[in-house]
Amino acid sequence: ESSLFELYQNEPNPFTKQTVVAFRLPEAGQVKLTIYDAAGKVVRVYEFDGIKGLNQITIHRSEVNASGVLYYQLDAQNHTATKRMIVAE
């Protein structure tokens, strides 16, 4: 079903250098991916134009400059979803 909004678990997880977050959008549009640390502090925000269907974004450890448990939240149109990722030492 192509009209789904879905956020997938990042792969690999845990990761050391980089990880890929994939998600599905029911339609093209502005997307915001926010990464938080365990305390809820924002460590990185990515904003870009998503396409209808499957999207992927590569996140580099150097961009988040954190380790341990992080949360990533995807906001697109009137949808939102959050998942957990782990940055290995």
Image (cartoon, rainbow, N blue to C red):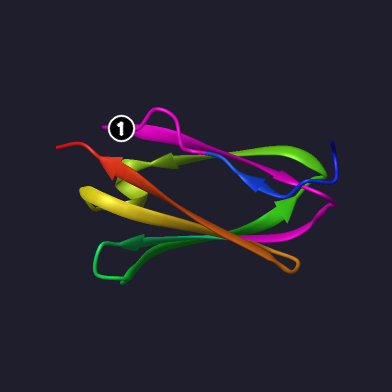
| Residue 84 in the figure: left or right of residue 66 | right
Quadrant where the C terminus sits is top left
The quadrant in which residue 18 appears is top left
Residue 10: percent from left, percent from top: 46, 37
| Residue 61 in the figure: left or right of residue 67 | right
16 or 77: nearer the viewer: 77
* Magenta stretch holds residue 39: no
**Going 48% across and 38% down the picture, which residue do you hit?**
9
Residue 4 vs 29, above or below: the answer is: above
* Magenta stretch holds residue 16: yes
**Going 28% across and 42% down the picture, which residue do you hit?**
86
**Going 74% across and 69% down the picture, which residue do you hit?**
78
Which secondary structure lies at badge 1? loop
Quadrant where the N terminus sits is top right
Residue 66: percent from left, percent from top: 23, 53
What residue span does the magenta drawing correspond to? 9-32
Disc 1: CA contacts within 10 A as few (<14), some (14-19) or many (>=20): some
Find disc 1 in the rendering and name its residue: 15
What amino acid does circle 1 point to?
Answer: Phe
| Residue 36 in the figure: left or right of residue 10 | left
